[in-house]
Image (spheres, rainbow, N blue to C red):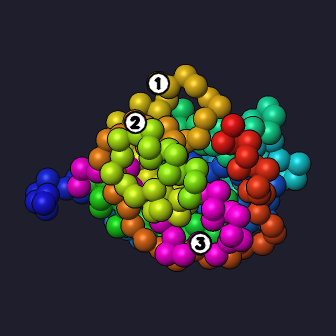
Amino acid sequence: QISSQSVRQTMKLSVVIPAYNESKNIGKVLDEISSLIVATGDVENFEIIVVDDHSSDNTLSAVSQLKNPNYEVIRLSRRSGSHIAIRAGLTRATGDAVLCISADGQDNPAMLKEMIYKINSGYNVVWAIRNNRDEPFYSKFFASLFYSLLKSLTATEIDSTNIANADFYILDRKIVNAVNECKERNTSVFGLILWLGFRQSHVMYERRERFSGKSKWNFRSRMKLAK
């Protein structure tokens, strides 16, 4: 049990958002996250880093045109996948903690205040885990198998079923630095975080439908990541 006196009151928060062809969604996602950050009352300063994974639409200009001093957008030289995009964003992040979340609106950041509280209370990683996984059987089976294997190779106490349902997460500065020090790039960010250990916790949330468009995360993407 951590006393209220030991909980940090304010922080600088970085947000890393990997985006591939999300020009129709990214503005709404940025507005929502910015509003929630301000509403928490726990964040003194924030930055949002959108990593454009070499989109073929105008995701890059959609962010640039907002001209918000809290927003930064960087573009990868070729399409590399969301995990590498997140790694790129983590190297640019300067906050005391970093929230990594998707650009399509499915990840509901309503639990942000609770996640920040857990980070401020001494946890290094807080996962947002959906209450249900409304996907085809093969997707659920693959995810369960993949994360069970990860758990067997790591020392984490987080249940592999929970991790299979994890979508977004917040990391403190200590673990961000540890991730950035790892030179291997072609790896699962989830797996790397689990392997690093540290104090990990989670919150539960209800996942939403995408704001618009179709998911780019498919069976082929999962197989490529698992190799």
Location of residue 145 in the rendering, given as x and y in whole percent from the top left corner: 58, 54
Label ID, residue 99: none
For label 1, the residue is 181
Numbered disc 3: secondary structure:
loop
Residue in front for this viewpoint, 87 or 28? 87
For badge 1, the amino acid type reads: Glu
Q: Residues within 10 Å of mark 1 (few under 14, many from 20)?
A: few
Q: Is residue 6 above or below residue 111?
A: above
Cβ–Cβ below 8 Å for labels 3 and 2? no
Residue in front for this viewpoint, 48 or 108? 108
Q: Label 3, label 1: how many angstroms apart (C-alpha)? A: 33 Å
Location of residue 197 in the rendering, given as x and y in whole percent from the top left corner: 35, 40
Label ID, residue 133: 3
For badge 3, the amino acid type reads: Arg
For label 2, the residue is 196
Task: Classify residue 158 by image quadrant.
Answer: bottom left
- Give the position of the N terminus as an image quadrant: bottom left
Say whether residue 178 is visible.
yes
